[in-house]
Each structure stands twice: as C-alpha cells, then as structure tokens.
Image: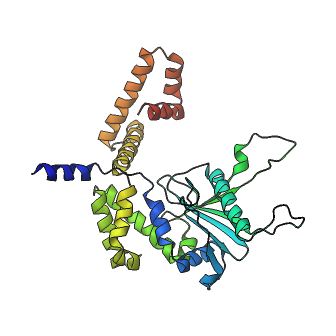
Amino acid sequence: MSQKSQRTTKKSRNHKVNRKYKDRLFRYIFKNKKDLLDLYNAVNGTSYTDVSDLTITTLSDAIYIGMKNDVGFLIGNCLNLYEHQSTINPNMPLRGLFYLVKMLQAYVELNHYNLYSSVQIALPFPRYIVFYNGEKEAPDCEELCLSDAFPKTADSKPALECRATILNINYGHNQELLNKSKRLADYAYFIYQVREYLKQGCTMNQAIDLAIEDCISKEILSDILIANRAEVKSMLLSTFNEKEYRKMLRKEARDEGLAEGRAEGRAEGRAEGRAEGERELNNLYKKLLSEGRMEELELAITDNEYRQKLLTEDS
C-alpha cells in the first residue's frame, strides 16, 4: 500500500465527529414547509393546510453569532421553537429562553413596534417543544421549567419563566404523535435502524448504508434518501463519533455484565462484561484504600449510586 493510501485509510479511520448527529438531519428533514406544517398539526391537534400561514423564523449563527436553533416559525398568533436533542438536558428551558428572546426581539423589530408606546404590544404566544431521540430512557412527555433552577422562596415568584415540553420520539414511543406525522415517524424509524445495525457490529458506514436501503425498500424517507443519499450520509458521518458510541455500548455491556454477575443464582451472563466490571470495582477499592479514603471506601461498598459515581469519574 502506498504512503498516500495509508494516509487516506488512516484519515478515514480517525474521522472525528460528535454524537449529536441526529440534530442536523432533523433540521434537514423538516426544512420543507409542508412537512413542518404537518408536524405542527400533529403536535397541536390543529388542521392547517396552507403553508403560506407559516413563517420561518429560525435563528442562524450568521445573524446571531454562536446561537442556532433547529426550527423556529410563526403560525397564526403562535411563535414556535422546535429543537431536537439526543441527550437529556435539564438546561433546555434556559436555552429556550435565550432563543425565544432573540426571536421576539426580531419580531418586534420587523413589525416596527415601539417599546416605549403607551399601548401594550400584542405578542405571539410562545411554544417550546424539544424532540428527544437519545439512548437513555425517558417518559413520552415531560415539562422542564426554568423556575426550577432558581432558589426557592415562599413569598415571591421569579420574574422569568420558560417551559420546555419534552417529547420522546424514539421508535416505539409517542405512537399517537408519530401516527399523525409520517415524516416524524419515518425519521424515528431511520435513526432506530442505524442504531440497530451499529449494535450488530456494523461500522457507521455500513450501518447508514443498510438503514438507507432498508428504509427505501419500505418507502420510509425514500424521497429524501433516493434524491439526497450522499447528503444524508455525509450529515451522519460528519457529526457522529463512532468511537464514543462504541465506548458507550461497551460500558452498557460492562454494567449489564456486572449486574448479572452479582445476581445470586444467575447461571448466565455476560462473562466478559462481568469480569471487566469486577476488575473495575477491585481497582476502585484498591485506589481508595491506598489513598486512605476510608469513608469513601465504606460508602462505595454500601451505596450503589455513590459507587457508580466514583466509577464514572474514574473512567
């Protein structure tokens, strides 16, 4: 193999990307106004049909440096912020506050409203929806409030509030919502298929190709995948950290193996994960003992949650 080929192969293997690969694809899929309107109807139980009723207000970092949201739009008297998250993030209400303030500021400026007028400015009703598609278990729907981050006082309410409604769109969750929005259901299935092929040991390249072929054969996102296959694949490859994903899968196997190995009377389990988990525990105990951290050692032995915290910090 030539030196150039070796460099190219090495570069391919070391392709560096981050785990938030689904966010960009989410924006790409819902850039079409008709699909976005269908998603809005599915979320709100409405029946809008005229795409001209919808005005895109998505922030871009070309306008607001360092701030970019997934989808922002106005419809009727409602200002909507739709975000996609692949991790559970309790700070989404704070992010939403920053975005919504910028969107409202743009709305006021666009309509030439006077902030110092004696007449109250009529503002659109803000709604903030986060579509969650991560690995960790989450309820179908939950609400996060900015006010939960403030100190609690008995005699006053905070001057600020922002509510984020988190909708779990993992395949198998919120089926009623997915039934109302084919694009959202197709998106959930496509990501599910990519993950399934990765779990079977495929490389990211293989997983994407197999998921694309599977979806095209079932007419799932087929119009996008056939016409824009290279773009979709590039979006996934350029923003997905396969190494980190494999590390996460190994950790899950270790945790599962450790749990199975400690279950009394269990005949089967993941021997490799169990052995590695036990080695990690022994190394942790030895470390705490050698450093004279006896209180932490005692707590680690008796408190599973604290033990897992120490193991995570040590990894």
Residue at 45% in and 65% down: 25
Location of residue 168 by image quarter: bottom right
Instruction: Point out the residue furthest to the bottom here.
Output: 50
Coloration of the structure image: rainbow
Judged left or right of residue 119, residue 228 is left
267, 211: nearer the viewer: 211
Quarter in which the C terminus is drawn: top left
Residue at 42% in and 58% down: 21
278, 17: nearer the viewer: 17
Name the spot of residue 190 as percent of width and height, x first: 41, 68
Judged left or right of residue 247, residue 56 is right
How many discs appear? 0
Please determine whether, in this image, residue 132 is positioned above or below residue 310: below
Name the spot of residue 178 as percent of width and height, x first: 53, 72
Name the spot of residue 34 as percent of width and height, x first: 55, 80
Judged left or right of residue 59, residue 301 is left
Please determine whether, in this image, residue 87 is positioned above or below residue 59: above
Instruction: Point out the residue furthest to the right here.
Output: 118
Residue at 54% in and 18% down: 295
Judged left or right of residue 136, residue 120 is right
Residue at 36% in and 68% down: 231
